[in-house]
Image (spheres, grey):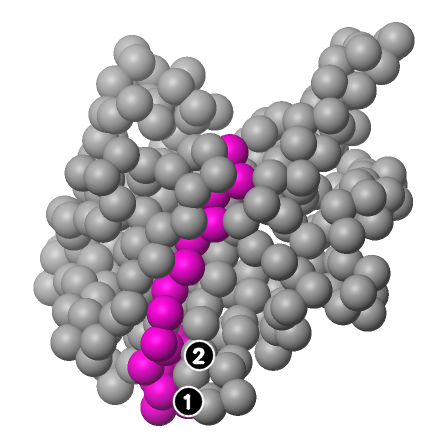
Protein backbone atom coordinates (compact mmCIF):
# COMPACT_ATOMS: atom_id res chain seq x y z
CA UNK A 1 0.00 0.00 0.00
CA UNK A 2 2.90 2.34 0.72
CA UNK A 3 4.83 1.51 -2.43
CA UNK A 4 4.57 -1.58 -4.68
CA UNK A 5 8.26 -1.40 -5.64
CA UNK A 6 9.28 -1.29 -1.98
CA UNK A 7 7.19 -4.45 -1.41
CA UNK A 8 9.13 -6.13 -4.21
CA UNK A 9 12.51 -5.04 -2.80
CA UNK A 10 11.62 -6.32 0.67
CA UNK A 11 9.61 -9.46 -0.03
CA UNK A 12 10.90 -10.76 -3.38
CA UNK A 13 14.43 -9.37 -3.75
CA UNK A 14 14.97 -9.39 0.04
CA UNK A 15 17.34 -6.44 -0.22
CA UNK A 16 19.07 -5.65 3.08
CA UNK A 17 18.01 -2.58 5.02
CA UNK A 18 20.04 -0.72 7.60
CA UNK A 19 18.52 -0.37 11.07
CA UNK A 20 17.36 3.15 11.88
CA UNK A 21 17.58 4.93 15.22
CA UNK A 22 13.83 5.64 15.25
CA UNK A 23 12.73 2.09 14.45
CA UNK A 24 15.23 0.55 16.87
CA UNK A 25 14.12 2.91 19.63
CA UNK A 26 10.54 1.85 18.94
CA UNK A 27 11.50 -1.81 19.27
CA UNK A 28 13.27 -1.07 22.55
CA UNK A 29 10.34 0.86 24.02
CA UNK A 30 7.92 -1.88 22.99
CA UNK A 31 10.08 -4.44 24.77
CA UNK A 32 10.13 -2.39 27.97
CA UNK A 33 6.36 -1.90 27.98
CA UNK A 34 5.82 -5.60 27.38
CA UNK A 35 8.16 -6.67 30.18
CA UNK A 36 6.74 -4.16 32.66
CA UNK A 37 3.56 -6.24 32.92
CA UNK A 38 5.62 -9.12 34.33
CA UNK A 39 5.71 -7.16 37.59
CA UNK A 40 2.84 -7.08 40.09
CA UNK A 41 0.37 -4.26 39.39
CA UNK A 42 1.50 -2.03 42.25
CA UNK A 43 5.12 -2.16 41.04
CA UNK A 44 4.41 -1.01 37.48
CA UNK A 45 5.90 2.44 37.93
CA UNK A 46 7.82 4.79 35.67
CA UNK A 47 11.10 4.31 37.58
CA UNK A 48 10.78 0.54 37.27
CA UNK A 49 10.04 0.82 33.55
CA UNK A 50 13.08 3.04 32.98
CA UNK A 51 15.21 0.63 34.99
CA UNK A 52 14.32 -2.06 32.43
CA UNK A 53 15.91 -0.09 29.59
CA UNK A 54 19.57 -1.16 29.96
CA UNK A 55 18.72 -4.85 30.16
CA UNK A 56 16.36 -4.72 27.19
CA UNK A 57 18.96 -2.79 25.18
CA UNK A 58 21.49 -5.54 25.95
CA UNK A 59 19.02 -8.20 24.84
CA UNK A 60 18.23 -6.32 21.65
CA UNK A 61 21.92 -6.08 20.76
CA UNK A 62 22.31 -9.82 21.37
CA UNK A 63 19.33 -10.78 19.23
CA UNK A 64 20.00 -8.21 16.50
CA UNK A 65 23.75 -7.48 16.39
CA UNK A 66 23.26 -5.16 13.41
CA UNK A 67 21.79 -2.45 15.67
CA UNK A 68 25.25 -1.95 17.18
CA UNK A 69 26.20 -0.29 13.87
CA UNK A 70 23.90 2.62 14.72
CA UNK A 71 26.44 3.96 17.20
CA UNK A 72 29.67 2.69 15.65
CA UNK A 73 30.79 6.31 15.08
CA UNK A 74 29.96 7.35 18.64
CA UNK A 75 33.08 6.39 20.62
CA UNK A 76 32.24 8.60 23.60
CA UNK A 77 28.67 7.30 23.79
CA UNK A 78 27.13 10.78 23.74
CA UNK A 79 24.72 10.08 20.93
CA UNK A 80 23.74 6.74 22.47
CA UNK A 81 23.04 8.51 25.78
CA UNK A 82 20.76 11.04 24.06
CA UNK A 83 19.01 8.22 22.21
CA UNK A 84 18.38 6.33 25.45
CA UNK A 85 17.18 9.55 27.11
CA UNK A 86 14.58 9.93 24.37
CA UNK A 87 13.46 6.34 24.95
CA UNK A 88 13.05 7.20 28.64
CA UNK A 89 10.92 10.22 27.78
CA UNK A 90 8.67 8.12 25.59
CA UNK A 91 8.21 5.62 28.41
CA UNK A 92 7.48 8.39 30.91
CA UNK A 93 4.85 9.83 28.58
CA UNK A 94 3.09 6.49 28.42
CA UNK A 95 2.32 6.77 32.13
CA UNK A 96 0.41 10.00 31.43
CA UNK A 97 -1.76 8.18 28.88
CA UNK A 98 -2.45 4.84 30.57
CA UNK A 99 -2.24 3.49 34.11
CA UNK A 100 -0.58 0.06 34.04
CA UNK A 101 -1.47 -0.58 37.69
CA UNK A 102 -5.10 -0.86 36.56
CA UNK A 103 -4.44 -3.04 33.52
CA UNK A 104 -4.10 -6.80 33.28
CA UNK A 105 -3.52 -7.57 29.59
CA UNK A 106 -4.90 -10.85 28.35
CA UNK A 107 -2.12 -11.00 25.76
CA UNK A 108 1.12 -9.19 24.94
CA UNK A 109 2.98 -9.38 21.63
CA UNK A 110 0.32 -11.81 20.43
CA UNK A 111 0.99 -13.56 17.13
CA UNK A 112 -2.27 -14.06 15.25
CA UNK A 113 -3.00 -15.86 11.99
CA UNK A 114 -6.24 -16.53 10.16
CA UNK A 115 -7.17 -17.89 6.76
CA UNK A 116 -9.95 -16.29 4.75
CA UNK A 117 -12.41 -18.29 2.67
CA UNK A 118 -10.36 -17.37 -0.39
CA UNK A 119 -7.33 -19.15 1.08
CA UNK A 120 -5.49 -15.90 1.78
CA UNK A 121 -3.66 -16.10 5.11
CA UNK A 122 -3.36 -13.00 7.29
CA UNK A 123 -0.72 -12.72 9.98
CA UNK A 124 0.30 -10.07 12.47
CA UNK A 125 1.62 -9.33 15.95
CA UNK A 126 -0.64 -7.35 18.30
CA UNK A 127 1.11 -5.31 20.99
CA UNK A 128 -1.57 -5.81 23.62
CA UNK A 129 -5.02 -7.35 23.99
CA UNK A 130 -7.22 -6.32 26.93
CA UNK A 131 -10.35 -8.29 27.81
CA UNK A 132 -12.99 -6.75 30.10
CA UNK A 133 -14.79 -8.87 32.72
CA UNK A 134 -17.81 -8.71 30.41
CA UNK A 135 -15.74 -10.27 27.60
CA UNK A 136 -15.29 -7.15 25.46
CA UNK A 137 -11.96 -7.03 23.63
CA UNK A 138 -9.69 -4.01 23.19
CA UNK A 139 -6.72 -4.13 20.81
CA UNK A 140 -3.91 -1.73 21.72
CA UNK A 141 -0.92 -0.72 19.65
CA UNK A 142 1.96 1.50 20.80
CA UNK A 143 3.45 4.02 18.40
CA UNK A 144 6.64 5.85 19.29
CA UNK A 145 6.02 8.51 16.66
CA UNK A 146 3.52 11.35 16.60
CA UNK A 147 -0.19 11.02 15.88
CA UNK A 148 -1.12 11.65 12.24
CA UNK A 149 -3.14 14.64 11.15
CA UNK A 150 -6.90 13.98 11.03
CA UNK A 151 -6.88 13.50 7.25
CA UNK A 152 -4.43 10.60 7.67
CA UNK A 153 -6.17 8.97 10.63
CA UNK A 154 -7.95 6.40 8.46
CA UNK A 155 -4.64 5.18 7.12
CA UNK A 156 -3.27 4.80 10.63
CA UNK A 157 -6.34 2.83 11.68
CA UNK A 158 -6.06 0.40 8.78
CA UNK A 159 -3.44 -1.66 10.64
CA UNK A 160 -5.77 -1.88 13.64
CA UNK A 161 -8.72 -2.93 11.50
CA UNK A 162 -6.46 -5.57 9.97
CA UNK A 163 -5.83 -6.97 13.47
CA UNK A 164 -9.54 -6.74 14.29
CA UNK A 165 -10.37 -8.72 11.16
CA UNK A 166 -7.93 -11.47 12.13
CA UNK A 167 -9.32 -11.61 15.69
CA UNK A 168 -12.87 -11.76 14.35
CA UNK A 169 -11.98 -14.58 11.99
CA UNK A 170 -10.23 -16.47 14.79
CA UNK A 171 -12.56 -15.84 17.73
CA UNK A 172 -15.83 -14.84 16.01
CA UNK A 173 -15.75 -11.70 18.18
CA UNK A 174 -15.65 -8.14 16.85
CA UNK A 175 -13.26 -6.18 19.11
CA UNK A 176 -15.06 -3.49 21.07
CA UNK A 177 -12.29 -0.93 20.69
CA UNK A 178 -9.12 -0.29 18.69
CA UNK A 179 -6.63 1.98 20.41
CA UNK A 180 -3.46 3.58 19.09
CA UNK A 181 -1.23 5.09 21.79
CA UNK A 182 1.15 7.70 20.31
CA UNK A 183 4.03 8.17 22.70
CA UNK A 184 5.73 10.74 20.48
CA UNK A 185 2.94 13.28 20.80
CA UNK A 186 0.98 12.03 23.81
CA UNK A 187 -2.20 11.29 21.87
CA UNK A 188 -4.55 8.32 22.01
CA UNK A 189 -6.57 7.50 18.90
CA UNK A 190 -9.52 5.16 19.38
CA UNK A 191 -12.06 3.59 17.08
CA UNK A 192 -14.97 1.28 17.82
CA UNK A 193 -15.36 -1.03 14.82
CA UNK A 194 -18.51 -2.72 13.60
CA UNK A 195 -18.79 -5.85 11.49
CA UNK A 196 -19.24 -3.82 8.30
CA UNK A 197 -15.81 -2.22 8.87
CA UNK A 198 -14.13 -5.60 9.00
CA UNK A 199 -15.96 -6.84 5.92
CA UNK A 200 -14.72 -3.77 4.03
CA UNK A 201 -11.16 -4.41 5.18
CA UNK A 202 -11.44 -8.01 4.00
CA UNK A 203 -12.58 -6.89 0.56
CA UNK A 204 -9.73 -4.37 0.40
CA UNK A 205 -7.18 -7.02 1.37
CA UNK A 206 -8.47 -9.38 -1.32
CA UNK A 207 -8.13 -6.60 -3.90
CA UNK A 208 -4.66 -5.81 -2.58
CA UNK A 209 -3.63 -9.46 -2.81
CA UNK A 210 -4.90 -9.64 -6.38
CA UNK A 211 -2.77 -6.60 -7.23
CA UNK A 212 0.24 -8.32 -5.61
CA UNK A 213 -0.48 -11.54 -7.51
CA UNK A 214 -0.62 -9.74 -10.85
CA UNK A 215 2.53 -7.74 -10.13
CA UNK A 216 4.36 -10.92 -9.07
CA UNK A 217 3.47 -12.66 -12.31
CA UNK A 218 4.10 -9.72 -14.65
CA UNK A 219 7.08 -8.20 -12.82
CA UNK A 220 5.35 -4.82 -12.99
CA UNK A 221 6.16 -3.24 -9.61
CA UNK A 222 5.78 0.50 -9.80
CA UNK A 223 7.27 3.00 -7.35
CA UNK A 224 4.92 5.35 -5.53
CA UNK A 225 6.67 8.53 -4.52
CA UNK A 226 5.70 10.07 -1.19
CA UNK A 227 7.18 11.86 1.80
CA UNK A 228 8.11 8.40 3.14
CA UNK A 229 10.74 8.07 0.39
CA UNK A 230 13.13 10.04 2.57
CA UNK A 231 13.36 7.06 4.93
CA UNK A 232 13.80 4.43 2.21
CA UNK A 233 17.08 2.50 1.98
CA UNK A 234 16.59 1.69 -1.70
CA UNK A 235 16.75 5.06 -3.45
CA UNK A 236 19.92 3.96 -5.30
CA UNK A 237 17.94 1.28 -7.16
CA UNK A 238 14.65 3.18 -7.47
CA UNK A 239 13.67 4.72 -10.83
CA UNK A 240 12.11 7.69 -9.00
CA UNK A 241 15.64 8.67 -7.96
CA UNK A 242 17.46 7.71 -11.15
CA UNK A 243 18.29 4.16 -10.10
CA UNK A 244 17.78 0.82 -11.81
CA UNK A 245 16.18 -2.10 -9.93
CA UNK A 246 18.11 -5.37 -9.83
CA UNK A 247 17.10 -8.05 -12.37
CA UNK A 248 13.71 -9.52 -11.50
CA UNK A 249 14.43 -12.88 -9.83
CA UNK A 250 11.12 -14.59 -10.69
CA UNK A 251 9.83 -15.90 -14.03
CA UNK A 252 7.45 -13.49 -15.71
CA UNK A 253 4.04 -14.92 -16.56
CA UNK A 254 0.88 -13.52 -18.12
CA UNK A 255 -1.49 -11.85 -15.67
CA UNK A 256 -3.88 -14.81 -16.00
CA UNK A 257 -1.19 -17.43 -15.42
CA UNK A 258 -0.66 -19.73 -12.45
CA UNK A 259 -1.40 -17.85 -9.20
CA UNK A 260 1.39 -17.27 -6.72
CA UNK A 261 1.19 -18.87 -3.25
CA UNK A 262 -1.42 -17.04 -1.21
CA UNK A 263 0.20 -15.54 1.86
CA UNK A 264 0.09 -11.91 2.95
CA UNK A 265 2.00 -11.21 6.17
CA UNK A 266 1.18 -8.07 8.15
CA UNK A 267 4.14 -5.86 8.96
CA UNK A 268 4.62 -3.21 11.68
CA UNK A 269 4.51 0.23 10.15
CA UNK A 270 5.15 3.41 12.10
CA UNK A 271 3.58 6.14 10.08
CA UNK A 272 0.64 6.73 7.78
CA UNK A 273 -0.17 4.38 4.91
CA UNK A 274 -2.19 5.01 1.79
CA UNK A 275 -5.65 3.58 2.55
CA UNK A 276 -6.42 2.87 -1.09
CA UNK A 277 -5.52 -0.34 -2.86
CA UNK A 278 -3.76 0.14 -6.17
CA UNK A 279 -1.96 -2.24 -8.50
Q: Is residue 10 left or right of residue 82?
A: left
- Residue 219 seen in the figure: no
Q: Residue at x 58, y 70 (%)?
A: 110
For marks 2 and 1, the one nearer the N-term is: 2
Q: Residue at x 20, y 80 (%)?
A: 195
- Residue 136 seen in the figure: yes
Question: Per the image, is 268 magenta?
Answer: no
Question: Per the image, is 177 magenta?
Answer: yes
Res. 260 image quadrant:
bottom left
Label ID, residue 41: none
Label 1: how many Cα within 10 Å (few below 14, some 14–19, many 20+): few
Numbered disc 1: secondary structure = helix
Res. 81 image quadrant:
top right
Residue 177 position, x and y percent, is: 36, 70
Q: Residue at x 68, y 53 (%)?
A: 33
99 lies above or below 138: above
Q: Which residues are magenta?
A: 166-184
Residue 95 position, x and y percent, is: 63, 48
Q: Which residue is mark 1?
A: 171
Find the distance from the CA under tag 2 to the CA under tag 1.
11 Å
72 lies above or below 265: above
Q: Which residue is mark 2?
A: 137
Query: Which mark lies nearer to you, 2 or 1?
Result: 2
Amino acid sequence: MQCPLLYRFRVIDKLPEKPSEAATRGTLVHAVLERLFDAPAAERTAPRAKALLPGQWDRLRESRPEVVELFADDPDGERLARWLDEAERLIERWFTLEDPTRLEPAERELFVEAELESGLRLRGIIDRVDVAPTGEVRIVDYKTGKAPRPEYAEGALFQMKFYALVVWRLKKVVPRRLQLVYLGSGDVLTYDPVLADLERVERKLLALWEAIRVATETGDWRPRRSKLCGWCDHQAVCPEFGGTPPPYPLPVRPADGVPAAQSLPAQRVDGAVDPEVSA
